[in-house]
Image (spheres, rainbow, N blue to C red):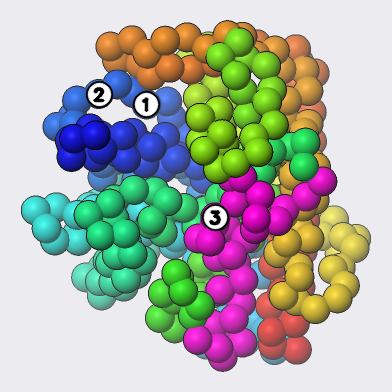
């Protein structure tokens, strides 16, 4: 494979994965030239909205009110969890431009990231990305090697739960990233391949990643053959061959399935942040056992929840890549039942994420 082919493949993967966050996503076309992809990179790094993450942070802020943990949060990051919840996504606007890691302001995400757009704050994002993009030599731009892979794992929904040995899991996946952030907040050293410099960085990452852990398509995946039928991958290679990048390559009309699930309805995020979320979160069953086992237990639960994403969804045969669009599986959904089921599951998952973020922080700072 030539260098250009390799890089193009890597960048395609990055574009596809770069959209995977809990918020509003947009559809990007594939099959672009390398030059065009390079020109799109800064924008692609932030194609999401903050509503889901801010909701998770706001619920945990309310649950922690008046606690030792809340005081520690303020002391460490000089803001509440809600504000810090989007930092890990804002850092995705750091791009390697002419050999220099640079934060690229995207006006579309000013509302979410504007608070971090000062020279001092941008330097912190650049520093994080530089440290967490350097483990794969010239392939450092590949999503499997970068901080962008910290936002997801891809476990087949026919598995009983998450295990780091399963196809679709990775040493730098979401579950491992949460474990690393917890370790740093407990006073430990950041375990490789993660390079988390200090408690402030760890807290911002943890707040964000606990949100991602509850977005079904950041954790559970249906692997598909060319006819659109589910397959069960036995190896990483089979997982790669049958991947739809967390639903980014499944299209409902022109909308990516992943984007649909990222997009939290306004009325839901507003009501949950206004207090309904905290009230419901107090009813969430707390995790038991050692804190080190919680991320795996919660990921396993999300794997089972993510099966619901594929109920009432009819996936067709894969279409070939065309100029301006990548290969994808077209799909239709049973409406309005599918939308209602989606909003119900998003609601439940946001509440659980807020409750669990608060539980982790209380366990770290009792
Ligand atoms: Zn994310």
**Magenta stretch: includes residue 247:** no
Is 185 one of the magenta-colored residues? yes
Please name which of the two marks, 2 or 1, marks the residue nearer to the observer: 2
Q: Quadrant of residue 333?
A: top right
> How far across and down, in percent of the image, does residue 360 sit?
71, 74
The structure residue drawn at horizontal position 54% and vertical position 82%, both measured from the top left corner, is 184
SS type, badge 2: loop
- Residue 28 numbered tag: 1
Q: CA distance from mark 2 to mark 1?
A: 10 Å
Q: How many marks?
A: 3
- Horizontal side of 1 relative to 252 (left or right) equals left
User: What residue do we see at 86% from left, 68% from top?
Assistant: 286
Q: Which mark is residue 32?
A: 2
Q: Quadrant of the C terminus?
A: bottom right
Q: Nearer the viewer, residue 257 or 87?
A: 257
The answer to whether mark 2 is within 8 Å of ligand 1 is no
Q: Residues within 10 Å of mark 2 (few under 14, many from 20)?
A: some
Q: Nearer the viewer, residue 125 or 175?
A: 175
Of callouts 1 and 3, the N-terminal one: 1
- Is 247 left, or right, of 281 in this rendering? left
Label 1 and label 3: CA atoms lie apart by: 25 Å
The residues colored magenta run 160-189
């Amino acid at each position: 494979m030539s260098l250009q082919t390799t890089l193009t493949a890597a960048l395609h993967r990055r574009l596809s994965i770069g959209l995977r966050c809990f918020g509003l996503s947009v559809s990007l076309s594939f099959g672009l030239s390398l030059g065009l992809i390079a020109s799109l990179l800064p924008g692609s790094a932030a194609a999401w909205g903050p509503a889901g993450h801010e909701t998770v942070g706001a619920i945990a802020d309310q649950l922690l009110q008046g606690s030792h943990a809340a005081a520690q949060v303020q002391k460490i990051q000089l803001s509440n969890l809600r504000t810090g919840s989007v930092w890990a996504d804002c850092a995705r606007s750091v791009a390697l431009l002419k050999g220099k890691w640079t934060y690229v302001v995207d006006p579309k995400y000013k509302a979410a990231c504007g608070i971090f757009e000062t020279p001092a704050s941008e330097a912190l994002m650049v520093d994080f990305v530089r440290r967490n993009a350097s483990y794969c030599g010239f392939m450092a731009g590949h999503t499997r090697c970068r901080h962008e892979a910290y936002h997801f794992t891809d476990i087949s929904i026919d598995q009983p739960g998450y295990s780091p040995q399963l196809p679709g899991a990775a040493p730098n996946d979401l579950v491992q990233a949460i474990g690393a952030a917890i370790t740093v907040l407990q006073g430990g050293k950041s375990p490789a391949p993660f390079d988390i410099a200090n408690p402030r960085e760890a807290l911002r990452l943890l707040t964000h990643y606990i949100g991602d852990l509850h977005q079904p398509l950041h954790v559970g995946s249906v692997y598909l053959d060319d006819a659109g039928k589910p397959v069960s991958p036995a190896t990483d290679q089979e997982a790669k061959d049958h991947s739809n990048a967390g639903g980014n390559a499944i299209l409902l009309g022109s909308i990516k399935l992943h984007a649909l699930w990222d997009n939290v309805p306004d009325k839901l995020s507003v009501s949950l942040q206004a207090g309904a979320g905290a009230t419901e979160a107090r009813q969430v069953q707390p995790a038991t056992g050692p804190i080190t086992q919680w991320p795996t237990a919660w990921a396993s639960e999300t794997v089972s929840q993510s099966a619901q994403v594929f109920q009432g969804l009819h996936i067709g045969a894969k279409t070939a890549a065309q100029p301006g669009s990548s290969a994808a599986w077209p799909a239709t959904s049973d409406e309005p039942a599918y939308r209602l089921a989606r909003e119900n599951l998003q609601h439940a998952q946001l509440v659980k994420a807020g409750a669990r973020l608060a539980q982790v922080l209380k366990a770290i700072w009792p």
